[in-house]
Each structure stands twice: as C-alpha cells, then as structure tokens.
Amino acid sequence: MSPTFRAFKVRNFRLYASGAIVSNVGTWMQRVAQDWLVLELTHSGTALGIVTGLQFLPALLLGPYAGLVADRFPKRQVLTLTQVAMGTVALVLGGLTISGHVQAWHVYLLALLFGVGTAFDAPTRQAFVVEMVGRDELSNAVGLNSASFNAARLLGPALAGLLINWIGTGPVIMINGFTYAAVIVSLRLMRVGELHTPKPAARDKGMIRDGMRYLWRRPDLMMVLVAVFFAGTFGLNFQMTSALMATEAFHKGAGEYGILGSVLAIGSLSGALLAARRVRIRARLVIGAAIAFGVLEIVSALMPTYLTFALVLPLVGLTSLTMLTSANATMQLSIEPTMRGRVMALYMTVLMGGTPIGSPFIGWIGQELGARYSLIIGGGLTVLGTVGSVLYFSRRRGLAIRPRLLPRPHLEVLPQTELLGEKAVLDAAPEPVPAQSGPSKKKDADPQVA
C-alpha cells in the first residue's frame, strides 16, 4: 500500500473514513446552502458573519468542558450522540426552509445549537483518531482525515450550488441531515477490541485547569496554538469571504460561489495528501505555512477578476491545510494520552472559538470597506499574530528563529546560546594575539565559555 494511505490498513479507520466522507460532503453542502439562505433573507454581510460566529461560539464557551467529556467517557458513544444532535438540527432547518416559514432568527438559533453539537464532536473526534490507528500512524491518519474533509469540500460546494438552483436551499440542508447516519453506522460496525483505548481519566477537581496549566508550561505548543488562533480567527473565514467576493466584488451567483469553494479545496486536498506522506512533523512547518497562508490571502484579495481570484485560491488552500494538519499532528504527538482530550479541546477552542470574534469583524469589514479588505485585513492579522507568537514563545524557550533562503526557503531554529557563541567568536576575531604576548586568549573566544 502507498505510504500516503498506510492508515487504511486499519479496519476501524477504513470504516470511520467511509462514513466521514459522506457526512463531510453533506456538511459542505449545508454550509453553502445556509450562507446562501442568510444572504437571501438579509442581504447583509454582517448577518452572514453573525451566523458563522454563532455556529462557532459554543466551541469557545464549552470547548474545555467538551475535552473533559472526551477524556472521561467512551469516545465512540460520545460521537454517536453528537451525530444525532447535529443531524436533528439540520433536518429542522431544512424543514423550516422548505415550508417557507424560515426567518433569520431561526437560522441564528439553529446555528448556535449546531455549534453545541460541534463543540463536543470536534475534540472527541480528534482524540479518537489515535485510538483507531495508534501513535505510529497518527500523522498519516490526520492527513487522510483532512484529505477526506477537503475532498468533500471539493465536491460539496459545487454540488450544493447546482442543487440550490434545481431544488432550493431547504432540500439541500435536509440532505445533510440524513448524511450523519453514515457516521453512526460506521461507529457501530467497529471492532472495539482493536481500539487503542487509554484508561479514562479519573474524576478529580480542577481537571480543566490542569489541562490549561499543562499547555502553558509548554511554550513550543503555545507558539503553535497562538499562530492557529490568529489564522482561525481572522484568516479562515472562507465561506464568508468567498461569498462576499463572489457577490460583491465579481457580481456572481450561487453556482460561481460554489465553484470557488471547490477550487479552494483542490489546494486543500493537495496539502492534506502531502501531509499524509510526512513521517516527521516540526513546529517550524506550522509557522512557515501560517505566514505563507496570510500572505497568499492578501494576494488573492488583489486579483482583478473572478478567474485570477480562482487561480490563486488553490495556493491559499494548500498553505492553510499544511498549517492545520501539521499543527494537529504536532499537538497530538507531543502530549500525554490522559491529557489528549482536554488539550485537543483547547486546541479546537482556539481554532474555532475565535470565529465568533473574527467572523463578525471580518464580515463588518467586508460590508463597510469592501469584500477585498476582508481578505487583506484577515491575512495581515494572521501574519502579524504568527510572527508575534514566534518572537515571544521562542524567547521563552531560549530559541532564536532565523529565515534562510538557501538551499531552499526555510526557518532555522537555534538555541540562543549558539547565537551568543557565534557573536563571541565574531567579537573576538578582530583582536589578534601577538606571538610575544603572554597567555593565549583562545579560551575567551570559545563559544562554550561565552
């Protein structure tokens, strides 16, 4: 089997992936349909940002508690319950839309309830991957999960755009409600004895606080976490920014908006498959990808036509998925098993929980200053936040990070003691020691002594 797909050797993961691809296609169809429904009801970019923010607000409020649930209860059962909850919300929203009774406040409320299900689903799903495949195949499984998600992103938006024109937004949302059954069936068919299930964390006071303290004592993980926060809060608002660019900047319809999501997914899928081939993941890959993503998002905003904008989007997708998959694998491979649920919940809280702040802000920017500025400001804040994270937390770790262009562009990470050693050598070099002068000064120029 190809190294790219080696995690598929595990039967439980094959089952999980088959159910996930069906559900993910439905999820992307609903995202496009829901955004289009909000624009039809309100004609407001701010309203679109509010809906997106409400959908991610529970991740901010409930994320740490959801991680505790993931550590204390069987993850397979928790995932089954979250699928039922999210499927029910989708069916209700679809029914209201088909009946013609849907109003903007219905969408707001149901987006919030859907977010509650997602808040509990996301950390449990992330922590469950290692239980299916073990540590050796974790980075590969994370990449394949992202590939599945983005293959669905490639198909889902385009399919949604076509179906919205043919049958309307309501039936598209209803279809997503039924796709959650695929995940439930795959979970029920798994062989429990083949799962690498750790001993559940014992109930104790201050467990959530322990997870936060654990992270704060790890500046390497905090550096990754802050970079992900800025990207997730201000940069990863594609469903909103693409809608604004399609309608406001290029004056296109639902079909062209759906195509933008699929084009973006081409790059995202490529990034996920490349991530699946990597055996070793380094934090500097997260940082480099985050900076490249922010820069490319700014570049995409400057494209003059719909076609040129679409041509840049695959690169945006490639860098964003490289950042996310490498960040996910870095976090999971660097933490203790009994902390995995809580730490991954905090990771998902940071990734998705910033959206209630960033999404309305970016939506407001798009409405007041224009769609292009929503991408320029989002990308700029991503770059500034990532650079600031590197400067602060690398200093806490006693590291220095320097850019290098040759033999290929990369970030070089060195202990600050090495840089001090280099400086000592340079400072000592102009002071030649005459043969007749007393003891040698070689020791003073020794980097180790300096």
Image (cartoon, helix red, strand yellow):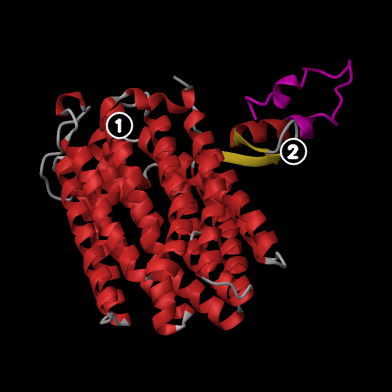
Task: Tell me the kind of residue under disc 2.
Answer: Leu
Q: Which residue is mark 2?
A: 405
Q: Nearer the viewer, mark 2 or mark 1?
A: 1
Task: Tell me the kind of residue under disc 1.
Answer: Phe
Which range is magenta? 425-450
Q: Position of residue 281 (x, y in %)?
A: 49, 32
Locate the C terminus by quadrant.
Answer: top right
Q: Position of residue 107 (x, y in %)?
A: 30, 75
39, 73: nearer the viewer: 39
- The overriding secondary structure of the stretch rendered in magenta is loop
The residue depicted at 16 percent of the width and 51 percent of the height is: 81
Horizontal side of residue 18 vs 266, given as left or right: left
C-alpha distance separating marks 2 and 1: 40 Å
308, 346: nearer the viewer: 308
Q: Which residue is mark 1?
A: 13
Per the rendering, the mark at residue 196 is: none
Against 10, residue 291 (above or below) is below
The quarter holding residue 260 reads bottom right
The residue depicted at 31 percent of the width and 27 percent of the height is: 133
Whether the residues at callouts 2 and 1 have beta carbons within 8 Å, the answer is no
The residue depicted at 30 percent of the width and 69 percent of the height is: 111
Q: Residues within 10 Å of mark 2 (few under 14, many from 20)?
A: few
Locate the N terminus by quadrant.
Answer: top left
Q: Position of residue 52 (x, y in %)?
A: 39, 68
Against 24, residue 354 (above or below) is below
The residue depicted at 21 percent of the width and 49 percent of the height is: 181
Lower position in the chain sequence, tag 2 or tag 1: 1
221 within the magenta span: no
